[in-house]
Image: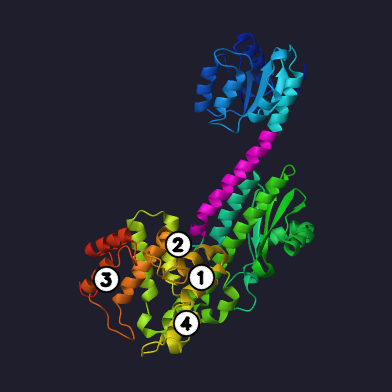
Amino acid sequence: MRKNKAGQQKNGFTMLVLDDDKNITDALYSYFESSGYTVETENDPLGALEKMKNKSYDILLLDFIMYPICGDQVVARLRQFDTRIFVIMLTGHREVAPPLNTIRELDIQGYFEKSDRFDQLELLVESCVKSIRQMRTVYRYQDGLGSILGSIPSIHQLLSLDVVLGRILGQMLLLGDNRHGFAWIKPKRIISSMPVENLPDDIFQGSGKYEKKLEQFLKEDYPQLENAVQKAGSSGDIQEFDGLFLVPLKANHDIFLGVLGIGRDSAYSDVQQRLLAVYGEQVTTALHNTILHMLLNINNRKLSLTYSRLKESYMQTVEALRLLVDAKDDYTRGHSDRVSMYAEKIAKKTGMEESQTECVRCAGLLHDIGKVGVSDAILCKEDKLTEEEFAVIRRHPEIGGKILSCIDMFHNLGEIVRAHHERIDGRGYPDGLRGEQIPPETRMISIADAFDAMMSDRHYRKRLSLAKAKEELEAGKGTQFDAGLVEVFLELIANGELGELEGT
């Protein structure tokens, strides 16, 4: 027999052997256990299916001819709940082997004619193991990317760069399945024309053999890595060098924020490299936004001067535009804050998911951002607007949608903001959407927007009483507003959940 043994040490792969002949299962158990696999056996096909429903295995070896169901029927049922397990079909009779189409349709990875030698079968199993190793890595990356994407909102909070970089390094080491690696960023590179003296030149964190101070890294490791790092920065592509994968952190407009180094014991597949590249893009966005968040707090008074350069970045930049809209018109100051708050409470009351609720909150803050494209003369006009002037005002949802579409991480808010003057009956603007065509987030914001407008003094009229505003909401159910959401909002008012309101 062919043996490629390394003692009794387990190799981390599990196997289920299914055959109605106990002598066969015993022989295969002995052979593959001694090869380092964790092996379980079963002589009943139906019992094997129950085992596989309750426990995951990497490889299934099974006979074709069995009772009460044959091997192909076992695999057909198996594929209904497990598409990842690798299957090798065994048969002792060539003339009754499963058809090739059956093998393909059931995604059976191998076929083996029984004999008293298991060399060829072991080769098939080893081929499966190689594929499983690759797929494990792909699944691990997919799960890791999902975890990172899910954690992005928390990264966008006011966290220090050290904390953010530490989280990124830890996640990257999990993705790379290696304890050796580093994360190195240069925060000041994010924007060159804005005072950033309060940001460090470099932030470095390492693990394993790279767990050292930046000065030591620059002295001991960087001289060898310099060309590869520079190439990664200029090309934006992953580079391989000296047991490392170097993932560039390259933001828009050719801003090279830094590099991640991930140790590797063997070459990564093309799929793995693509996943690493996607992960690098996500990390770059998170770091880009975190650094901008810091800059916007440090340079809050200079936000208006830097907006044109930061429009593709973090929410705080858009926040500056929202403040700018409020500042253009004394009568609407604070309007966006209240609309955001009211709409967010509607979203929470309806049990909307946290991510959607966050969209409602942000879109509420930004719903009137398009008014930056409307002149002060029209916004602040105390007389009745002409038809031409009203047409200009009606363009602000469309303008706002276009502004937000320029911001990568908030492109999904553009549709919400664009539609905030649409009506359930289709008589709104700019697109004449009706009913379910209007995003649910927008339907919440529309109610909040109309209510706050009614409860505020405007150039052309005084505020309405609370009672009158509630009447108007009732009257608009099913025509201007989503009827169910109006009921939710009125309940919030009745319960005092909107805070102190005029006329209560």
Which residue type carries mark 2? Cys
Looking at the image, which is closer to me, 248 or 435? Answer: 435
At which x and y percent is residue 332?
37, 80
**Secondary structure category for the residue under label 1:** helix
* Extent of the magenta region: 131-155
Which residue type carries mark 1? Gly
Sequence-wise, which precedes: disc 4 or disc 2? 2
The kind of secondary structure the magenta stretch mainly shows is helix
At which x and y percent is residue 280?
64, 56
At which x and y percent is residue 394?
45, 78
Which residue carries the number 4 mark?
392
Which residue carries the number 1 mark?
401
Q: For the residue carrying disc 1, how many other residues have a C-alpha within 10 Å: few (<14), some (14-19), or many (20+)?
A: many
Looking at the image, which is closer to me, 219 or 140? Answer: 140
Specify whether residue 270 is in view. Answer: yes
Which residue carries the number 2 mark?
359
Q: Is residue 171 above or below residue 365?
A: above
Measured Cα–Cα span from mark 1 to mark 3 = 27 Å
Residue in the image at 56% along x and 12% along y: 67
Q: Are marks 1 and 4 in contact (CB under 8 Å)?
A: no
At which x and y percent is residue 155?
51, 59
Sequence-wise, which precedes: disc 2 or disc 1? 2
Sequence-wise, which precedes: disc 4 or disc 3? 4
The number of discs equals 4
14 relative position to 320: left or right: right
In the rendered image, the quadrant that contains the N terminus is top right
Magenta span contains residue 137? yes
User: Disc 2 vs disc 3: which is toward the camera?
Assistant: 3
